[in-house]
Amino acid sequence: MEFGVFILAQQRGYHQSSEQVIQNSIEQTVVAEQAGFNTAWFAEHHFNNYSLSPSPLMMIAHMAAKTKRIRLGSAVCILPLYHPARFLAEVGFVDVVSNGRLELGIGSGYQQFEFERFGVKIEESGAIYNEFLDIIPKGLMQKIVEYDGKYIKLPPSSIAVRPVQNPMPPLWITSGNPVTLGRGVREGHNLFVTALLNGKEAIVSLRERLDKVAEDNNANLDDDVKFGFLRCAYASNHQSEIDAYLGCALFQRRISESLKFRRAQSEDGYMIKEVPYETDPTLEQLRQNLPVGSVNQVIDKMLEEISILRPKHIALQTQLGDFDQKTMLKQIELWGEKIIPAIRKEVESMNAAAVAA
């Protein structure tokens, strides 16, 4: 069982400077490595305070110089917003400077606001993404790559800096579309999924959908597919800390919904309004849904979710809203010291029992 931290780099208000948000992300990554996490994941978003991370690959290159062991992942690079030649070159470069620690998460994007400002039609994002997925393995594994698609046209070209990892960095596919996930399964890539802020029923449903995706593509989910699960979770004996974390998680949901459906916009064109919606869960519902509570409560809830979903990787959402940085660093250390070892030990016992049976 692998564990990662997912760092969104959010700015909840002008009481946080952009410099402070990015420095917090850097510090959390360093502490995550010290705590024994396997991977740090970095988002990509543009033009608003939902995430201040415009380039996961730039962040990975920077963190490669500040860390030695932890793997560094994009979660995700929004492919339709890139030029394929530059993207391939930068992927090769980042894998080299990180000494082969790149985990390459990719997606098609969903925020129309971003696409409009890059001059890309969001209605074409899926088709562009699929052409990118054609060209990425060729560009990273072949000396010369060329492509003549509807959206991507690349004359014979050589990517000068080749990846360290052989044959290429692992690809992680994130999507709610079973067709997109199915292609990832067929081509042997990893999947990245989430149940957002929902509880057990959503996780059961997610497992069923993934089983069907695997079955429809002649694969067994447990044996043939590596997939990661993004989850909000927090351990503390102090209810005020848990409530603060859940409040930040709810903030993230609200502005994500605003950006996706254009429900609200800020007065200054940047800072998205945090507007309550009728569909908002209460903090009590979030406490019921998510692995939050004491260390033992979090371990038990995580093990219950793992027994249902059976992921190979869990990414813990750390940097949310304006949650206190010192408290979050202590949380990351707590996971490394107590929670992750306990979960791994129990998962190993469950796996051993399953093999014996």
Image: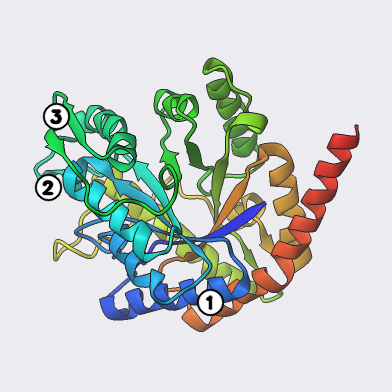
Label 1 sits on residue: 31
Q: Which of marks 2 and 3 is in front?
A: 3
Q: Which is nearer the N-term, disc 2 or disc 1?
A: 1
Q: Which residue lies furthest to the right in this view?
A: 357
Label 3 sits on residue: 151
Secondary structure type for disc 2:
helix
Residue located 27% across and 59% down the image: 55
Q: Colour scheme of this structure image?
A: rainbow
Q: In the picture, residue 142 is in which quadrant?
A: top left
Question: Closer to the camera, 221 or 305?
Answer: 221
User: Where residue 105 sits in the image (x, y, percent)?
Assistant: 40, 47
| Label 2 crowd bin: few (<14), some (14–19), many (20+), radius 10 Å | few
Q: Which is nearer the N-term, disc 2 or disc 3?
A: 2
| Label 3 crowd bin: few (<14), some (14–19), many (20+), radius 10 Å | some
Label 2 sits on residue: 118
Q: Is residue 350 above or below residue 153?
A: below
User: Where residue 23 sits in the image (x, y, percent)?
Assistant: 36, 79
User: Where residue 256 sits in the image (x, y, percent)?
Assistant: 35, 51
Question: Disc 3 residue type?
Answer: Tyr
Residue 294 disc label: none
Question: Disc 1 residue type?
Answer: Val
The C terminus lies in quadrant: top right
Q: Is 319 left, or right, of 311 in this rendering?
A: left
